[in-house]
């Protein structure tokens, strides 16, 4: 049985029309690391500033309450960076992020704190993200205590309830992370995120490190939480099978930019962007193994010096002169389906 058969049918949650989160022109640049020779040369010729890695480049996206938006793209295209900007781990370098219709830059300190708690991130490696020296009760209970969401006298019951909700035995509250399996540790990470009563989860390859059968259980848990708590997800994954199974819409990212967004069924049946087509061509339609795509022919260009015009032009089989100069705008190609390619006119 493959992972999707095990995970079963995804129940439909209620999706609102108004965006919970809206990104407009969001960018994230990092200063590139330079080795000693580069640094000395730069000083000699008087160029002191470091080149920038354009990890996220002018991204505009909307995610509605109750929705699961899948985010897909090759390694290094900026998915985690975008997820971290959304979760407030990295400050954005440019653009606007609106939460419930208000720019987060305009929130006062109290509102900003609430908004930061409302977006939580679930990481890939549960072991690396849990403090090995802390008991599960402290791992889960630390943040809600610190933020005044629970009184010390109520902590045990609060953690009990969270552990039960994520399918862990609450009598194990005083154990340490190493006393749990990989799947259970990921559940601890999920309980820790839920402890601050979030509305939005950024899942960054959150099931990638787990065995296939455990992946299906954790995916089921995410979907039950979506229904039970009305959660919204940005779901980053290399596994197109998982993304196809759980997402309402999918966004395709290439070298820092979103190049196509569509309802999931439409994206897989009628991809528009040549990059999306190439990604989907890499995977078999029916497979018993997780459907990871392999990087297509040609290297992903460096985000230190992205190609001008359409970033994909160095690898695109349909490249035209215009593509090398002019960045294609997002155009609507079908209802709710947008794509950035000059082939669309
Ligand atoms: N803290 C950082 N400092 C400098 N550069 C960074 C930093 N984080 C990410 N980058 C660079 O930004 C680009 C995007 O990286 P990111 O981790 O967001 O990609 P990704 O799509 O999540 O890749 P993967 O699928 O491998 O997880 C890469 O070139 C990466 O080297
Ligand atoms: S804009 Fe040009 S290079 Fe870019 S995907 Fe479309 S055809 Fe290919
Ligand atoms: Mg990543």
Image (tube, rainbow, N blue to C red):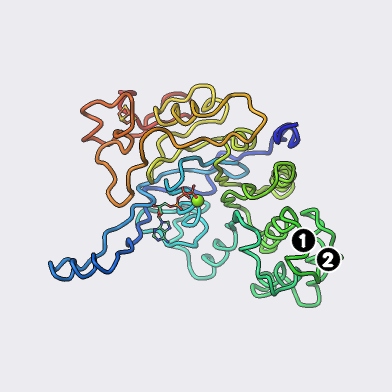
Which mark is on residue 140? none
Indicate the quadrant of ligand 2 in the picture: top left
Task: Please state, as top left, top right, bottom left or bottom right, where the N terminus lies in the image.
Answer: top right
Q: Would you call the spot at circle 1 few (<14 residues within 10 Å), some (14-19), or many (20 or more)? A: some
What residue is at 63 percent from the left and 36 percent from the top? 290
Mark 1–mark 2 contact, CB under 8 Å?
Answer: yes
- SS class, disc 1: loop
* In the image: residue 312, left or right of residue 97: left
Query: Within 8 Å: ligand 3 and the Cβ of disc 1?
Result: no
Residue 93's quadrant in the figure? bottom left
Residue 166 percent coordinates (x, y): 77, 54
Q: Is residue 240 above or below residue 217?
A: above
Furthest residue toward bottom: 152
Residue 125 percent coordinates (x, y): 62, 57
- SS class, disc 2: helix
Q: Nearer the viewer, mark 1 or mark 2?
A: 1
Furthest residue toward front: 37
Residue 286 percent coordinates (x, y): 63, 24
Residue 5 percent coordinates (x, y): 74, 31
Q: Is residue 137 above or below residue 166?
A: below
200, 33: nearer the viewer: 33
Furthest residue toward left: 45
- The residue beneath circle 2 is 172
- The residue beneath circle 1 is 180
What residue is at 60 percent from the left and 54 percent from the top? 124
* In the image: residue 78, left or right of residue 13: left
What residue is at 54 percent from the left and 48 percent from the top? 20
């Amino acid at each position: 049985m493959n992972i999707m058969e095990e995970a079963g049918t995804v129940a439909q949650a209620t999706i609102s029309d108004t965006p919970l989160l809206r990104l407009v022109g969001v960018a994230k640049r990092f200063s590139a690391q330079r080795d000693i020779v580069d640094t000395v040369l730069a000083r000699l010729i008087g160029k002191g500033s470091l080149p920038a890695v354009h990890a996220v480049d002018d991204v505009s996206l909307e995610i509605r309450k109750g929705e699961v938006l899948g985010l897909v793209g090759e390694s290094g295209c900026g998915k985690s960076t975008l997820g971290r900007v959304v979760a407030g781990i990295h400050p954005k370098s440019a653009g606007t992020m609106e939460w419930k219709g208000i720019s987060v830059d305009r929130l006062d300190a109290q509102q900003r704190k609430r908004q930061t708690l409302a977006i939580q991130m679930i990481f890939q490696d549960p072991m690396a993200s849990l403090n090995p020296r802390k008991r599960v009760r402290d791992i889960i209970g630390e943040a809600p205590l610190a933020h005044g969401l629970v009184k010390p006298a109520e902590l045990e019951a609060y953690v009990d309830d969270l552990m039960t909700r994520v399918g862990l035995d609450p009598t194990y509250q005083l154990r340490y992370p190493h006393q749990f399996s990989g799947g259970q540790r990921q559940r601890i990470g999920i309980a820790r995120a839920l402890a601050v009563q979030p509305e939005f989860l950024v899942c960054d390859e959150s099931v990638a490190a787990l065995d296939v059968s455990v992946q299906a259980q954790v995916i089921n848990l995410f979907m039950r939480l979506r229904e039970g708590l009305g959660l919204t997800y940005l779901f980053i994954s290399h596994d197109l099978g998982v993304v196809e199974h759980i997402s309402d819409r999918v966004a395709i990212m290439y070298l820092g930019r979103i190049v196509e967004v569509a309802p999931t069924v439409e994206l897989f049946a009628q991809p528009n962007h040549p990059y999306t087509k190439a990604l989907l061509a890499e995977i078999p339609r029916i497979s018993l193994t997780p459907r990871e795509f392999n990087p297509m022919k040609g290297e992903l260009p460096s985000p230190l010096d992205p190609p001008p015009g359409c970033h994909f032009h160095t690898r695109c089989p349909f490249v035209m002169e215009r593509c090398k100069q002019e960045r294609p705008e997002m155009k609507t190609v079908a209802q709710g389906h947008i794509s950035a390619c000059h082939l669309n006119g």
